């Protein structure tokens, strides 16, 4: 059986598909998958047998309706698909799915649970409860194609080779902690001055800290932290995405916002201490098999106020982040390191 899987957009959301794909292929040995997504995300699928990554160039030749039709023609030239799993459910993916549906294929589409998420994030009469995790929503799409994931299993990913320049850092014998202080929206970011203090305390406690970030502005901040703090090394802007994944796969622990780095670490079974502000793990975007108790957050009546953190704080004080004590993050990091850094040592959202 050969199915097409569609998931464009955010890096973290695409990373969340990886453990589901692994389990699906493990439990269905005759299955082959072609996964179409943004071209630069190909390294996420390196080493997954029977999974072919097909790059989409959404800002270039696959842009717009004509581009989607061109992408359809390219995919249709591959060995015939037996079904299509739309794990995104946006205009682009629906258009692409429609082309295949007209060609006679069954197309299964993600249910995003919009009404539940609206109830979770509304200002009044908030229903603050655990919603269906996104990993489970993904597997429901496959189940509609006759490909259930019967149970989630521990399929150990292989640690990737550390870039040569960083081998001495990992050879110190000290715990190596990754810190990713940035997120797409301010409402999901711990104040930088407070996070810098966390990094200083982690480094002072005989840990090595590696800093992860994105664009030029973030890179500049992290380069300054590297200069200011001993035993701290900036990764941003110096390595390819493939190299960054290799580095993350070898870390003892990651400290992250509700951002893509939480999911990158999770697919390698690296424990994550995640910091949450406007968003909440209850929305379903928590790291794969990460213990819920490793989410550091304050209990406020207004949380969560949005699913993705893209709505301004209506209180205007960002209390969810500003009142979160740095000591809580440090204590959680120490607790996880003391437990041996096993993300499956305690209860998780996914078993």
Image (cartoon, rainbow, N blue to C red):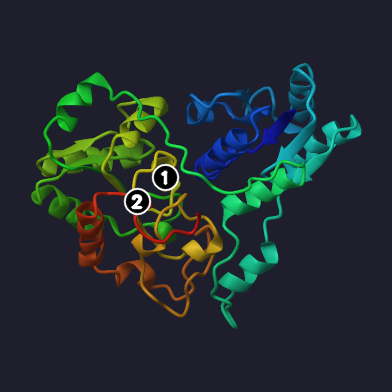
Measuring from the top left, give residue 51's x and y in whole percent.
60, 26
In this view, the residue farthest toward the bottom is 125
Snapshot quadrant of residue 214: top left
Left or right? Give the position of 281 relative to 31.
Answer: left
**Residue at the location (41% across, 29% down)?**
241
**Residue shown at 12% from the left, 40% from the top:** 231
Q: Is 342 positioned to the left or the right of 119 in the image?
A: left
Percent x, y for residue 71? 73, 24
| Label whose residue precedes the other's in the sequence (2 or 1) | 1
Label 2 neighbourhood size at 10 Å, few (<14), some (14-19), many (20+)? many
In the rendered structure, the answer to whether residue 298 lies left or right of residue 348 reads left
Q: From this viewpoint, is residue 329 visible?
A: yes
Label 1, residues with CA under 10 Å away: few <14, some 14-19, many ≥20: many
Does 75 sit above or below residue 95? above
Q: Residue at x 84, y 32 (%)?
A: 99
Disc 2 to disc 1, C-alpha distance: 7 Å
**Residue 267 image-quadrant placement:** top left
Numbered tag placed on residue 272 in the rendering: 2
Q: Is residue 11 above or below residue 69?
A: below
Q: Which residue is mark 1?
A: 266
């Amino acid at each position: 059986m050969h199915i097409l899987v569609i998931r464009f957009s955010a890096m973290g959301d695409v990373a969340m598909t990886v453990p589901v794909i692994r389990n699906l292929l493990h439990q269905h040995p005759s299955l082959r998958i072609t996964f179409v997504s943004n071209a630069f995300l190909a390294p996420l699928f390196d080493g997954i047998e029977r999974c072919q990554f097909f790059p989409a160039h959404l800002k270039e030749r696959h842009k717009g309706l004509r581009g989607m039709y061109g992408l359809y023609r390219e995919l249709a030239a591959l060995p015939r698909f037996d079904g299509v799993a739309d794990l995104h459910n946006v205009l682009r993916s629906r258009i692409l799915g429609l082309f295949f549906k007209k060609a006679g294929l069954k197309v299964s589409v993600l249910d995003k649970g919009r009404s539940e998420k609206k109830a979770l994030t509304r200002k009044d009469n908030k229903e603050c409860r655990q919603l269906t995790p996104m990993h489970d929503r993904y597997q429901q799409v496959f189940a509609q194609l006759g490909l259930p994931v019967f149970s989630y299993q521990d399929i150990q990913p292989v640690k990737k080779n550390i870039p040569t320049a960083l081998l001495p850092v990992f050879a110190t014998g000290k715990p190596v902690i990754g810190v990713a202080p940035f997120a797409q929206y301010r409402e999901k970011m711990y104040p930088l001055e407070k996070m810098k203090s966390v990094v200083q305390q982690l480094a002072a406690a005989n840990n090595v800290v590696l800093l992860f970030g994105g664009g030029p502005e973030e890179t500049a901040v992290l380069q300054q932290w590297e200069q200011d703090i001993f035993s701290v090394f900036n990764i941003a802007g110096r390595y390819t995405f493939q190299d960054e994944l290799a580095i993350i796969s070898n870390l003892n622990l990651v400290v992250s916002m509700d951002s893509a780095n939480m999911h990158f670490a999770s697919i390698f079974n690296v424990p994550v201490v995640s910091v949450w502000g406007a968003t909440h793990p209850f929305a379903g975007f928590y790291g794969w098999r990460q213990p819920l108790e490793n989410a550091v957050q304050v209990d406020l009546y207004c949380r969560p106020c949005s699913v993705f953190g893209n709505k301004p704080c209506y209180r205007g004080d960002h209390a969810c982040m500003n009142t979160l004590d740095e000591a809580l993050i440090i204590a959680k990091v120490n607790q996880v390191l003391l437990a041996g850094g096993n993300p499956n040592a305690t209860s998780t959202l996914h078993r």
